[in-house]
Image (cartoon, helix red, strand yellow):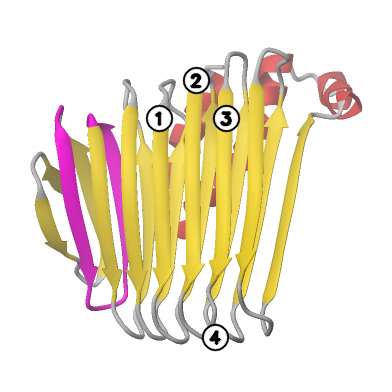
Amino acid sequence: MKTIRCNEDIILHEGLNEIVIDAIRHLHLTFTAHIDCEVFVRIVACRSLKIDTFTEAGKHVSFLFWNETAAHLDVEEHHEVLADGDLSVAYGEVNDASMKRHVQVALRQQGANALVSSASLVRENKEYVMEVINFAPHTTGNMKNFAVMMKGGHLNIDAVGKIVKGAHGSQSHQTSRALSFEEDQHATIVPELLIDEDDVQASHAMSMGSVDPDHLYYMQTRGLTMSQCISLISTGYLLPIADTIKDETLREKLREQLEKEMAAL
């Protein structure tokens, strides 16, 4: 495990790379993947974070950023994916702090693919701008965002899929869903598809709603308290984000941490 407290250029190694960011300052990190790898980044403390990643041709790279900060965090990210590269970037947030994140993924060369996903427990202000841009032919961009809204939570997601002229045979798809347990919360999800090419596939799906009262009633008749119902449903809704990382030990730790956070609601 590597702890980062200053700006750094990081060459990723094969297998699982575990990184902890613990710095009360502004950081700029660059990640370069010459080989297939997984990266788990636990953010303990940071004022603002700028991240650049480079996925080389034909490589498969997965990032999972796990935000545990106790104070507001600003994040700006730019990801480059080259020919036949495959990138997965995921964000898990169950902390009780506000944040603002701007993510841009550039599918720069033919055959590049990317999946951007997030799972958030929203009790403060959370703002996301996510852009996946198809610059080259036969590239595929996907976005999947899931949020559980709690009392006092404010969520704004601006999800942009863009296919430029000349990027024929490309795909851009996105799904965003927000689930609410409380009345005193607000969620805005804006899906955008900016298409400048004819021979492409593009779609978006968006839903916001409350938990079915009949579902909650049934769970309570089985002996569960309302708090336990919320914990179980929220965990099931958010936990799949851990599947970004294949390492079973780490996934189990994340499952335990998420269940602990949910039980404390």
Q: Distance between the residues labelled 4 and 3?
A: 33 Å
Question: Quick check: marks 2 and 1 in contact, CB under 8 Å?
Answer: yes
Secondary structure beneath dot 2 equals: loop
Residue wearing tag 3: 155
Q: Distance between the residues labelled 4 and 2?
A: 39 Å
Whether residue 218 is visible, yes or no, is: yes
* Amino acid identity at mark 1: Met
The magenta region covers 24-47
x then y, percent, for residue 198: 68, 81
Residue wearing tag 1: 99
Secondary structure beneath dot 4 equals: loop
* Amino acid identity at mark 3: Leu
Q: How far apart are marks 1 and 4 (CA)?
A: 34 Å
* Amino acid identity at mark 4: His
State the mark number for residue 124.
Answer: 2
Q: Distance between the residues labelled 2 and 1?
A: 8 Å
Question: Quick check: marks 1 and 4 in contact, CB under 8 Å?
Answer: no
x then y, percent, for residue 143: 57, 58
**Mark 2, residues whose alpha carbon is within 10 Å: few (<14), some, or many (≥20)?**
many
Question: Quick check: marks 4 and 3 in contact, CB under 8 Å?
Answer: no
In reply to whether residue 34 is colored magenta, the answer given is yes
Residue wearing tag 4: 138
Q: In which quarter of the image is the C terminus?
A: top right
* Amino acid identity at mark 2: Glu
